[in-house]
Amino acid sequence: MPKSIQEIKKEFQLASGASLKDLCQLYEEDPRSGVQALIKKAKNQEKKLEQEYARLEAMAIYEKKYSQVPYIAGIDEAGRGPLAGPVAAAAVILPKDCRILYLNDSKKLTPMRREALYDEIMEKAVSVGVGIVDNERIDQINILQATYEAMRQAIQKLSVEPRLLLNDAVTIPLVTIPQVPIIKGDAKSLSIAAASIIAKVTRDRMMVEYDQLYPGYGFAQNKGYGTKEHMDYIRNNGPSPIHRRNFIGNLR
């Protein structure tokens, strides 16, 4: 007696990789439409997975170019543009040949995907460093210099000293480690993409906490960016202690 479609479906759900291919071959002559639908779905999944690995290989071009360097750190920041809150930077050293599925520029990912990738990066990375510079310091030295300061903090917090930095677009002053600035690097380098996710998730979590301290500004939703609701609330209620005074100017 042939297996039921539900039994076969369970086999497909539990299978992966080569075993999934074996199942497709095993049941390819089964005439039942339900079984053929399972095979079609499995093949589509396999094709998407192959495309994803190809995308990751394309994003590893700089990591492969400098593969002789023992430790490469990707550097990126989050929070240069908001009206409130800190700027965060991250430095991430991934293991050689590390491929984390769906790793990408943090701006191209959903919050749920970023959170999942954050955990996986923290688990798999050789080392992760995070730098935070608050709004008062941003007002003192300007956002660009504050970003550089956060990046230097992140590098200093790595438990392993990198021999090369892959940076998203910038060259960080006062750093002696060789640097490679890459325009739109968070979409072109696995290490920088990983850093972009760590920086973004770290800062977003801080803004959710600030929302509890300073309700009304919508920090949990807008993360400090200048939405209409956010700016209207500043006009009506004044700025909070975490607003960047140089950014809001006369918006009162």
Image: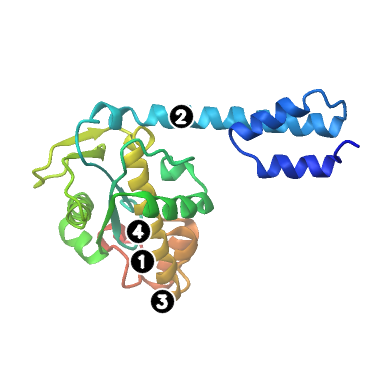
Q: Position of residue 82 (x, y in %)?
A: 36, 55
The label on residue 83 is 4
Give the CA distance from mark 2 to mark 1: 47 Å
| Residue identifier under label 1 | 252
Farthest-out residue, bottom: 213
Q: Secondary structure at mark 4?
A: loop
Q: Earlier in the sequence, mark 3 or mark 2?
A: 2
Give the CA distance from mark 2 to mark 4: 35 Å
Q: Position of residue 9 (x, y in %)?
A: 77, 41
Mark 1 and 3 residues: CB-CB less than 8 Å, in contact?
Answer: no
Give the CA distance from mark 3 to mark 4: 17 Å
Give the CA distance from mark 1 to mark 4: 13 Å
Mark 1 and 4 residues: CB-CB less than 8 Å, in contact?
Answer: no
Please determine whether, in this image, residue 22 is positioned above or below residue 208: above
Q: Secondary structure at mark 1?
A: loop
Question: Which of label 3 and label 2 is nearer to you?
Answer: 2
Q: Earlier in the sequence, mark 3 or mark 4?
A: 4
Residue 35 versus residue 132: which sits nearer the camera?
A: 35
Circle 3 packing at 10 Å, graded few (<14), some (14-19), many (20+), is few
- The amino acid type of the residue labelled 2 equals Arg
* In the displayed structure image, the side of residue 151 where residue 10 appears, left or right: right
Residue 48 versus residue 90: which sits nearer the camera?
A: 48
Image-quadrant location for residue 43? top right
Question: Which of label 2 and label 1 is nearer to you?
Answer: 2
| Residue identifier under label 2 | 55
Which residue is at a point 30% across and 56% down the rendered structure image? Answer: 88
| Residue identifier under label 3 | 213
